[in-house]
Structures are given as C-alpha cells and as structure tokens.
Image: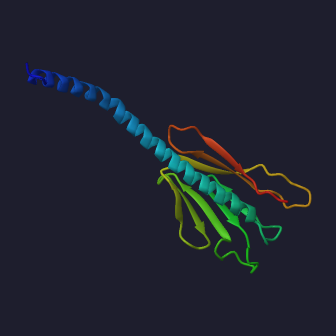
Amino acid sequence: MRSGFTWLELLLATSVAAVFLALAQGPLLHFSSLLTDQYTTSAKQRQLDRFLLMLKTELIQAGYALGDDAEPVQVSSDEVLLLADLNRDGDLNDTRERISYRFRAAEKKLQRRSGSGSYQTLVEEVGAISFALGPGRDLPMSPPQHCVVVGVRLDPDAEDLSYTLCPIFL
C-alpha cells in the first residue's frame, strides 16, 4: 500500500481552499480600506492640531505694541487676520507682524501667510473650516481678549467640531 494523496484529494483540498480565500477576500479588502480611511483622518487631525497650536500662539501675540484704536484680530467666515508690531518699528510689514489664515472651500485647503509672503498650505482635503470672533473676557488690568472660534469638519460625513481659542493674560 502506498502512502500519500491522490490527485482527487489534492484537487478537492485546493478547491475548498480557493472557496475559503474567495469568501475572505471581501472582508479583507473592506478592512484594508477602513484602515486607509482611518490613517487619512488621523493625518488630517494631526495637521489640524498643529494649525490650532500655531493660531493659539499667534493669537497671544496679536495686538503687541499696537495703539488702543487698532483691531489686532480681524475675523471673517473664511479668514483670520492677526496684527502685531513685534519689533516696534511702527509698521506691520515685517515677517510675522501680519499673519493671515484662510480656508478656500473650492480647493478644500487651509492656508497661512506671514507678512507679504505667499500662502502656504497647512491642511489639504478638509471638509470645511469656518472662523468667528468669539466672546472675550474683559479682565481688570489687562487688554480685552479677542477669542477666535474655529469650526471644523474634517470629512463631509464627519461631525462638526468647534474650538474656541483665547489668549491668556497673566
């Protein structure tokens, strides 16, 4: 008697394995696309976090060495302009003295410009970003606060997020 598998047994085992692989292919491809979507959303969130940190830092400096009648924070629905005379030379034409953030809905890009330079893209393929001047607090012995409310939707089917950024005066 010979040991081993017959051609029929090998053909049957190969057919069963092929059926199992075909059945498992659909869920595996779906899982792969879910991982890709999660990675993309996570990358957008990291870019958004960096943007919020930059905006918060520059919001703290807004209004430095400006007169009392100046508006250091100017907000529209798709743009924020921050002004500060950091080197106290009386103009706002130097780098980092006039900082603008804007969202271009048609391009789905959040961009930043410092001084008279060109816009740099900070976040791409974002669903929506909006800006609004938020409620500030008038604290004794300090200048009035200028809070900025940033509304964000990373993807069209994601929920809206809202961040309120206010400078802290000590």
Q: Give the residue displayed 81% in from the left and 71% down from the top.
A: 67
Residue at far front of view: 1
Observer-nearest of 23 and 8: 8
- Quadrant location of residue 47? bottom right
Q: Nearer the viewer, residue 130 or 48?
A: 48
**Residue that protrudes farthest toward the top in the picture:** 1
Left or right: residue 7 compared with residue 120: left
Split into 4 quadrants, where in the image is the N terminus? top left
- Which residue is rendered at x = 74% and y = 61% of the image? 60
Query: Residue 56 lies in what quarter of the image?
Result: bottom right
Indicate left or right for 36 with 26 as reference: right
Q: Is residue 62 visible?
A: no
In the rendered view, would you say 134 is above or below 84? above
Q: What colouring method underlies this structural image?
A: rainbow
**Can residue 33 be seen in the rendering of this structure?**
yes
Residue 168 appears at what percent x and percent y?
A: 79, 57
Q: How many marks?
A: 0
Of residue 41 and residue 17, the one placed in the foreground of this image is 17
Picture coordinates of residue 49 (x, y %)? 61, 52
Task: Give the vertical position of 128 relative to 115 (above or below).
Answer: above
